[in-house]
Amino acid sequence: MSESLGMLDIFALLANGIGFTVLVTVTCSLTAMLVGLLIAGTRRLGFRAMNPFLDVYTYVFRGIPVLVLLFMVYFGLPGIGIKVPPLMAMALSLGLISGAYLAEVFRGALNAVDPAELLAAESMGMSRLQIFRYIEFPQMLRFSLPGMVNEFTSVLKYSPFAYTVGIPEITKQAIALTATTLRGTEIYFAVGVLYFAIFKILLMAVKFIERRYCAPDMLAS
Amino acid sequence: MSDWSIFRDDLIEQMPLILGGLGKTLELTAIISLTGFLLGIVVFYLSLSPSRFVRSIIRGYISFFIGMPLIVLLFLIYYGMPQWGISLSPFTVAVLGFTFNVAAYNAAYLTTAHNGLDPVEAEAARAQGFNRLQIFKLITLPQVLRLSIPALTNQVICNLKDSSVAFLIQYTEFFARMQEVAATNFQFFKAYFFSALVYLALVSLIVLASRALERRYILPT
Amino acid sequence: MPLISVHNLVKEFSGQRVLNGINLEVYEGDLKVVMGPSGCGKSTLLRCLNRLIEPTSGTIHFRGQDITGADVDIRALRQSIGFVFQQFALYRHLSVLDNVTLALLKLRGMSKAEAEEKALHELNRLGIATHRDKYPSQISGGQKQRVALARALAMDPVVIFFDEPTSALDPVMSREVADLINQMRAENVTMLCVTHDLRLARQISDRVVFLDEGVVKAEDTIDHLCNAHSDSKINDFFSSGVRGQ
C-alpha cells in the first residue's frame, strides 16, 4: 500500500482515461443521434411499410441490457466470423440502444409541433421534404433538447462498460490503480467526481447552445 | 446445426444453475425495486422539507447519485469498504448500491409529478387543519404516485436490465451463469443471444403488468 | 373574366356532404366575405381552393385554368395564393423576419439580402418592422396577425385568403385586423375572407356571401340580410349577430 499516494495523484492517474471516456461517450451519442433521427424521420415522412420494423427495433433495443448486447457484439460475433473493434462494439451496443430511446424522444418532439404551422407551410407551397427540413426538424431538435440531454447523460453513465472490452477509459484506470494500491474508497470516489464533472461540463455546453439557438418560448428548462 | 444441439445440450445440462441465476436476477430486481421505491418516497418527502438545509442536502443526494455511473457506485462499495475492515457480500453491495441509485431516480420522478400538481389542494388541506405529514400521506403522495406510475414501472424495467451489471462484482445472477455456459462450449454468440431473449421476455412481462396497473390506477385527466 | 370561378363544388367526408354544390366568383380587386355558422363548410371551401383539401367534384377555375385536375402544379398554385390562418400559425422557431423570408429563400430562391429587403418592405407596410428580431411568443395577437399577413404578402400573391382572421383576437385587435384588410383593399389587393364575425364583416364590406349546409344561401348586403329575412336560417344567424353587438 503506497501511503504517499495523495488525492491529487489519484486524479492525475485517472485523468489518463478521461479522453477515452469522452471518446466512447461522443461516439455512442453520435451513433444514437444518427439512428434516432433515421427512425423518427422515416416514421414522420410516412413510409408506412417501414413502421413495423421500426417498432420492433425500438422495442427490442430498449429491452436488452447494454452489457448483454455489448458482450454479444464483442465476444459473440467473432464466433460467427465477424470481428468488431472495441469502440465499434460500444457504438453497436450502447449506441444502438440509446438510438432506440432517442427515436422515442424525437417522436414525442415531432408530435409537439403545431399542425397549424405545418398547414401554413403546405399552403405556402412547400413540398413534404421542405416542410420536414425547415419546420419540423428544427422544432423537433429544440423540443427534444431535455430528452437528448437525458440520453447523452445516460450514455456517459454506461460508458464505463467500455473497460470490459479493454478500452482504457477512467474506470479501467481505476481498476488497475485499485489492484496496486488497494485504496478503492478514494479511487472510486475520485472516479465519481470525474464523471460528475464531465456531466456538468456537458450540461453547460448544452445550456450554451440552447441560449444561442432557441426561440424564447421553446427553452427546455 | 450440431453447434446448436451442443449448445442446447449444455443449456439443458446447466439448467439448474441457469434457473438459479435467473432466480437471483429476479430476487435482486424485486428487492431493489421495492427498497428503491420506499427510499425514493422518503427522499421525496425530505425534498419538501421546510428546512432549506435539508432540501439542499437532498438536492445534493439526488444529483450525486443520478450523476454517478451505477457500476462506479458498486465498485466504490465493493472495493472501498474492505479498506475500512468491512467485507460485504456481492449481494449486499448490489442491494445497497442499487437502492441509493434507484431511490434518487424515483425521487426525481416524484418531484417532476409534484411540480405538475395544483398547490391549492395542499393549501386547502392546511386550511382544514391537517399537519404536514398528513397532507403528504393523504393528499400529495397518492396523486404523485398515480401520476408517476409510467416512470416508476419504467424504472423497474431498468432495474431488471441493470441487474446484469451485478455480475461485474461477482454476483452469480442469470447473466453470470450464461457466461459460464458460454465458457464451457465457446458458443458465446448463442449464449448471449439466448440471454438477450430472456431479458426481452421478462421486460415484456413487466410492460404488460404495468399497462394493467396504469389502466387501473391512473387518474382521469 | 373572374380571377376565381367555382362551379358546382362538392366535398364529401366519409359520405357526409360538407360542400353541396358551391358556385362563387371572385374578381380581381374584390374583397369577398363569406359568412355562415360554424360547420357550414366555409373553411373547407377555402382549403379546396388551394387544394389543401381535394374536392370530390365540381370545377375551380383560377385565372381561367381548371385547377382540380391531377396535372396541375399544386405547389405553384399555392405559392400564388396567400393564406392567413385563424391561429396565425407563425413558425415558433423563427424570428418575425425569418418567418417572412423563409418562403422567399427556399421557394423563390432569393438571396438573403433580397429576401430581407422584400420582407422588411412588407413588415414596414404593416408597421411592425421594429419587431423584426422578436419571436412569435414575444408579440401580441394583433401583431402576430400582421406578421402572418406580411408573410403572405411577401410572396406577391394573386389573392389572399383569410380564414377566420379575428377568432383568436379580442375586439380591439379585431379592429386592427379590419383596418389592415381595409388598407389592403385600398391598395387593390384581391381578398377572400371567411368569417363568422359579423362585426368584422361590417367593418370591411357591405356585401357578404352567406353559406349554410354546404350551399350559397344568399349574396346580399349585410343590411338586407339583417332585416327580417324570409329565410329562417339567415334570420337566426344575422339577428343573433346584431344582438351580439
Image: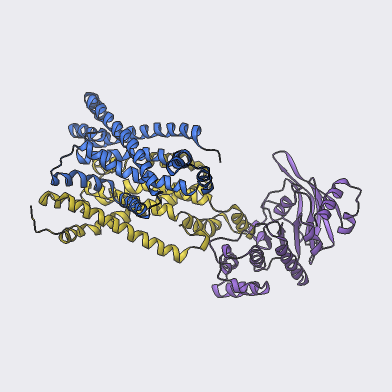
Chain colours: A yellow, B blue, C purple
Q: Is residue B149 left or right of residue C14?
A: left
Viewer-proximal residue among C216 and C158: C216
Measured from the top left, where is residue C233 in percent x and y?
85, 46
Viewer-proximal residue among B216 and A124: B216
| Residue farthest toward the front in the current orientation of the protein | B129
Taking the image as drawn, is residue B101 in sight? Answer: yes
Q: Quadrant of the C terminus of chain A?
A: bottom left
Taking the image as drawn, is residue B9 in sight? Answer: no
User: Residue at position x 90%, y 56% from top?
Assistant: C224
Measured from the top left, where is residue A137 in percent x and y?
50, 56
Viewer-proximal residue among A151 and A131: A151
- Count how many numbered circles sit on residues in the image: 0
Q: Is residue B23 above or below residue A196?
A: above
Residue C6: quadrant of the picture:
bottom right
Q: Is residue B180 left or right of residue A137?
A: left
Measured from the top left, where is residue B48 in percent x and y?
41, 48
Measured from the top left, where is residue A140 in percent x and y?
49, 55
User: Residue at position x 66%, y 66% from top?
Assistant: C146
Residue C89: quadrant of the picture:
bottom right
